[in-house]
Structure formats: structure tokens, C-alpha cells
């Protein structure tokens, strides 16, 4: 963006005029800032980027945003705004509208990152597509994604996350989506929001500033009841699908008289794929293009990631966990594998009923008709003891620490076994892999 565009987009007060108007790249990090970049300092609970403005200028920044008129310097451009995060969002929105790419926005209690990845894989078959990296789905991640998108991007696939009411509304305001997708409404963050109704309300904020006329969502009565949208609504579910074949790393299914394949198993992955199929269809893609895009999809790190170490095969799905994603994970494992070793950790942010959610998961596992005597369930953490305490129909063990669990596995679980890891990221289950590798 040119300096003149920064001033207009952020409604900035010019403290030091530029000698000429020239293109700059926005940088929010003095550790990686390059000569000629324009520094935008962000603030958080434990950091204040404005303290590093002089450092940015010393490193060759062409200028900087600030909130106070108290800066030294001789040559660099200085622009004053009331709030640097808001300025960042306004700059991102300016670029979004300047390049005018189609924006597909995705949210959901679980599965939103996988759904985003599937949609991007499909759309890449027809369009120059850019997507939110990993799960960088907050305000800063939104801005970074928009600025990192190449100028020739045709479709931008944005993941939108939230921890409370009003957050997705902000993302929608500055992204102005053309098409919106909600993968589901579950109990993730219920500790903060208090009820599934409030979670649905927060997720449905995604349509608040939508300028396109297509809304796609999991067929959920709560979503239907909550969403306030006047355009076309498309709802999908596993009930619309005929599963033709499924194994650990393969799915084949029929949907709307067309056959599709995935290089992953699990009913929930098929359901996420339905969102991608409908998105592709609404953007004018041919069935064959969509079919090819789905087949090319590969899971990202910590999403059904297969690792061989210490004589074991590990399926690592410890990217995140809530009651719905845990049940979907367990369903897939028990349906597709013999003699599985399930290693489950605490689920976070479930509020005052967190113990009951863990108990219910244990009861759910124990009630499965396909639970096997040769299935082993290992729980790790404080809350997850409530899972294994409620399992009677197969072997179960509980450990307070990862180290204790790793020692037990090495001594008691035969080499060649398949271990399935699922927990909230705060449990740091990658340490299990590291421990077994030693």
C-alpha cells in the first residue's frame, strides 16, 4: 500500500509528512521488520509494541503508526491513530476491497480448521486461492492473512474463531464475506458463553456484515433458529450421504448423485467435506473439479497426523478437543481400528460443568457397542480421570502426568500398537511423542 493509502484507510493524523508517496509493506514485529517496511505497533495484556517504535525506525522502517505525539526521529513518516489494532483492521479492509477477491468465511465449534482446509483444497482447482494459515483466526490473524494474500488472489478462505460474543462480528465487519460457512455449534467455549444458545448466537455473527447471498451450515435446528440472514441458506448433514467405503485413510461416499473420495477416514471428515462441496458448487465449480480438490486434501499437523516412533504408530489429533470432537474421534477409531490404544487428555474451557462433560465422555465410550476388550483407554490430566472412572467394558488407566503415562506405555503396551492421541492443546500431547522417541 502507498503511504497516502495508509493515511486514508486508517484515518490517520500525519505527524511527519512523507517526502514522496511510495509503496510500503506493513510489519507488526520489529524482530522481522525489513528496511522500507512500515511499522504498526500492536498492544496486548503483556506487551506494548509502541515501546519498540524507535527500534523499528533504527532498523530502517520507512515510518510508523503511533497513538501519542511524543516521538523522536528525523526522516521517517509518523502517523497517529487512536487505536493501532483498529487501524490494522481498517487497513486490511481497505486492501480486501481494493483487490476485491471473493471471501469465503468459515467458523464452527469444531472442525472449522479442517473445513477451511478442505474448502481451500477444492477451490484451488479453479481459482487462485489463499487461506488463513493454521488457525490464525482472530483479528490479528485476519489482518495478516489479508496482507499476505498475493495481489492476484481470486478467493480468500478465512477461518474465524471466537472466545466470546461480539468477536466474530468484528471479523465479519472487516472481512465483508461473500459466502459464509458454519461447520457446527457445540460446547467449545461454553465455559465463557454459558449456553449452546449463546455459542450459536456468537457463531451466527459471521453473517452480520456479509455482502454475498450464500450461507452454508451443518443441518442444526439451533443454527436455523438463530441465524438472521435473508439470502440463500444451504444445510447439509451426514444423513444426506451414502457411505460407499471407509478405512483409516480413505473415504468414498455419494452425495447428491455424485461420488467423492477423501484420503482420510471418519464420518466427521465426510461432513466437513460437504461444506467444501457446497461452497465449490455455489462458486460455479464443476463436479469433477470439486472431486479432484477433495482427493488432494491432506490433514495439517496434529490433525490425524500419523507418526512412527519408539516402535509405535501414533495417530496424533491433539490439535484441540471438546466433547463433540472427542466423540467423533472415538467413533472413527472404534469403527476403523482393531486393538486401539486411546490416549485422552483434559478438554479445556468447559466451565462449571467440566467434570460432567468428562464423565459423559467416559459413559459414551463405555456404551459403544463396538467397544472391544482389547481396546485400551489411557487418560492423562486432572479432569480426564472422570473419563476412565466411567469405563468398565475395556482396559482403562489414568495418570496425572505425561511422564507417568509414557512410562506405562513403554512397559505395558506392545510394540507395533497403534496409539490415538486427543486432547486440548494446553495438554501439550506432543510430549508423549517425544517421550516415546527416547
Image (spheres, rainbow, N blue to C red):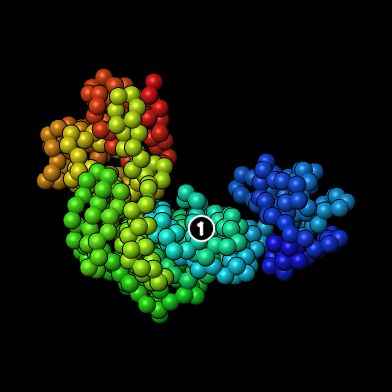
Give the residue at x 76% y 66%: 4
51 relative to 312, above or below: below
* Residue at the extreme right: 74
Q: Name the residue under label 1.
A: 130
Labels in figure, total: 1
Q: Residue 369, position in %: x, y? A: 11, 46
Q: Quadrant of the N terminus?
A: bottom right
Q: How crowded is mark 1: few (under 14 residues within 10 Å), some or many (20 or more)?
A: many
* Of the pair 154 and 161, the residue shown nearer to us: 154
Q: Which residue is drawn at 57% across and 58% down?
A: 149
Q: Residue at x 38, y 24 (%)?
A: 437
Position above or below: 91 against 309: below
Q: Quadrant of residue 219?
A: bottom left
**Residue found farthest to the front:** 288
Query: Residue at 22% of width from left, 23% of height from top?
Result: 414
| Front position in the image: 114 or 82 | 114
Residue 132 visible? The answer is yes
Image spot of residue 335 (x, y percent): 18, 45
The x and y percentages for residue 223 are 33, 68
Task: Please state if 329 lies on the left or on the right of 372 as rendered.
Answer: right
Q: Position of residue 245 (x, y in %)?
A: 19, 52
Residue 172 visible = no
Q: Is 115 displayed left or right of 258 in the figure?
A: right
Q: Which of 222 and 310 is in front in this view?
A: 310
Q: What element carries label 1?
A: strand
Residue closer to the observer: 233 or 188: 233
Q: Is 262 placed above or below 216 here?
A: above
Give the position of the C terminus as an image quadrant. Answer: top left
Amino acid at each position: 500500500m502507498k503511504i497516502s493509502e495508509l493515511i486514508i484507510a486508517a484515518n490517520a493524523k500525519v505527524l511527519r509528512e512523507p517526502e514522496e508517496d511510495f509503496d510500503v509493506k506493513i510489519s507488526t514485529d520489529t524482530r522481522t521488520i525489513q528496511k522500507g517496511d512500515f511499522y504498526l505497533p500492536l498492544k496486548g495484556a503483556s506487551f506494548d509494541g509502541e515501546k519498540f517504535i524507535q527500534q523499528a525506525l533504527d532498523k530502517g522502517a520507512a515510518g510508523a503508526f503511533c497513538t501519542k505525539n511524543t516521538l523522536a526521529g528525523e526522516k521517517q513518516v509518523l502517523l497517529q491513530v487512536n487505536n493501532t489494532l483498529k487501524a490494522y483492521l481498517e487497513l486490511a479492509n481497505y486492501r480486501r476491497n481494493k483487490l476485491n477477491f471473493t471471501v469465503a468465511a468459515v467458523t464452527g465449534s469444531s472442525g472449522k480448521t479442517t473445513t477451511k482446509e478442505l474448502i481451500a483444497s477444492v477451490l484451488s482447482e479453479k481459482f487462485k486461492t489463499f487461506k488463513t494459515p493454521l488457525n490464525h483466526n482472530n483479528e490479528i490473524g485476519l489482518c495478516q492473512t489479508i496482507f499476505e494474500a498475493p495481489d492476484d488472489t481470486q478467493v480468500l478462505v478465512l477461518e474465524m474463531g471466537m472466545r466470546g460474543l461480539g468477536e466474530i462480528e468484528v471479523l465479519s465487519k472487516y472481512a465483508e464475506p461473500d459466502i459464509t460457512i458454519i461447520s457446527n455449534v457445540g460446547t467449545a467455549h461454553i465455559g465463557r458463553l454459558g449456553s449452546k444458545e449463546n455459542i450459536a448466537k456468537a457463531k451466527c455473527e459471521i453473517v452480520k456484515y456479509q455482502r454475498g447471498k450464500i450461507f452454508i451450515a451443518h443441518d442444526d435446528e439451533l443454527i436455523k433458529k438463530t441465524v438472521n440472514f435473508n439470502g440463500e441458506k444451504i444445510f447439509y448433514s451426514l444423513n444426506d450421504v451414502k457411505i460407499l467405503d471407509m478405512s483409516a485413510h480413505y473415504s468414498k461416499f455419494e452425495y447428491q448423485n455424485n461420488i467423492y473420495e477423501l484420503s482420510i477416514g471418519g464420518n466427521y471428515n465426510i461432513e466437513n467435506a460437504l461444506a467444501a462441496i457446497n461452497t465449490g458448487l455455489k462458486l460455479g465449480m464443476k463436479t469433477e473439479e470439486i472431486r479432484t480438490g477433495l482427493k488432494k486434501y491432506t490433514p495439517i499437523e496434529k490433525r490425524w497426523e500419523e507418526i512412527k516412533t519408539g516402535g509405535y504408530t501414533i495417530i496424533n489429533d491433539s490439535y484441540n478437543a471438546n466433547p463433540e470432537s472427542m466423540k467423533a474421534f472415538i467413533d472413527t477409531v472404534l469403527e476403523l481400528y482393531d486393538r486401539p490404544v486411546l490416549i485422552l487428555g483434559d478438554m479445556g474451557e468447559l466451565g462449571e460443568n467440566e467434570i460432567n462433560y468428562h464423565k459423559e465422555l467416559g459413559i459414551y465410550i463405555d456404551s459403544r457397542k463396538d467397544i472391544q476388550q482389547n481396546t485400551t483407554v489411557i487418560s492423562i490430566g486432572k479432569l480426564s480421570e472422570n473419563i476412565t472412572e466411567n469405563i468398565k467394558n475395556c482396559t482403562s488407566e489414568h495418570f496425572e502426568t505425561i511422564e507417568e503415562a509414557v512410562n506405562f506405555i513403554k512397559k505395558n503396551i506392545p510394540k507395533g500398537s497403534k496409539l490415538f492421541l486427543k486432547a486440548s492443546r494446553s495438554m501439550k500431547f506432543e510430549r508423549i511423542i517425544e517421550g516415546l522417541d527416547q
